[in-house]
Amino acid sequence: MSRGEQALSGFWGIFNKISWLDSVKMKDLLKDYYPSEIHCVDYIGKNAESNVTKLAESFNMTRSAISKLAKKMVAKNLIESYQAADNKKEIYFRLTEHGQTVFEIHEKLHDESHERDRPILEKITEEQYDSMLVFAEIYNKHLDKEIEKLGINAKKGLDKL
């Protein structure tokens, strides 16, 4: 296995373990919601004037996929739509009271995860972080170019992730 393959394998292993550890608590406290709904609640809770376009760009999904997701979230009383007084054309989303509760539970779980990982992250040197961040930036740009090569259908494929 090459050094690049070792690095990717290591990062993939870390990602899978973090996902599994986090999902254990989330499955218990947020079992009635899909991860896409939780991520959407998180985005809307942190970003004022969230709309279909902003959500689609943030999640690399099509606007139609976000619209379908939003309808399900409205039905689950997580979000509500509204229009700004000065712009009747654009539809925005905000959290309902129930959605705010889900957002706060999610934030608490993230805080617990950060606290769990803090001891190891404090041991990483600035130089090590710099190297990891450079790698992440280079690799993300590479993947963006690969997605671009696939064209518009690539976004539709990302909707299913």
Image (spheres, grey):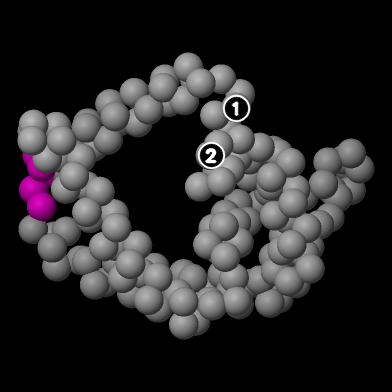
* 2 or 1: tag closer to the N-terminus: 1
Q: Secondary structure at mark 2?
A: helix
Boundaries of the magenta span: 124-128
Residue shown at 69% from the left, 45% from the top: 65
Q: Residue 101: name its quadrant.
A: bottom right
What residue lies at 10% left-to-right and 52% top-to-bottom?
A: 124
How many dots with numbers? 2
**Which residue is the site of mark 1?**
153
**Which kind of residue does numbered mark 1 sit on?**
Asn
Q: Position of 43 compared to 85: left or right?
A: left
Residue at the farthest top position: 149
Where is residue 6 drawn, in percent x and y?
Answer: 12, 40
- Residue 2: name its quadrant: top left
Q: Residue 131 versus residue 49: which sits nearer the camera?
A: 131
- In the rendered image, residue 105, in percent from the top left (x then y), is placed at 51, 76
Which amino acid lies under the numbered mark 2 shown in the image of this protein? Leu
- Decide which of 138, 155 is in the foreground and name it: 155
Q: Which mark is residue 158?
A: 2
Is residue 155 inside the magenta stretch? no
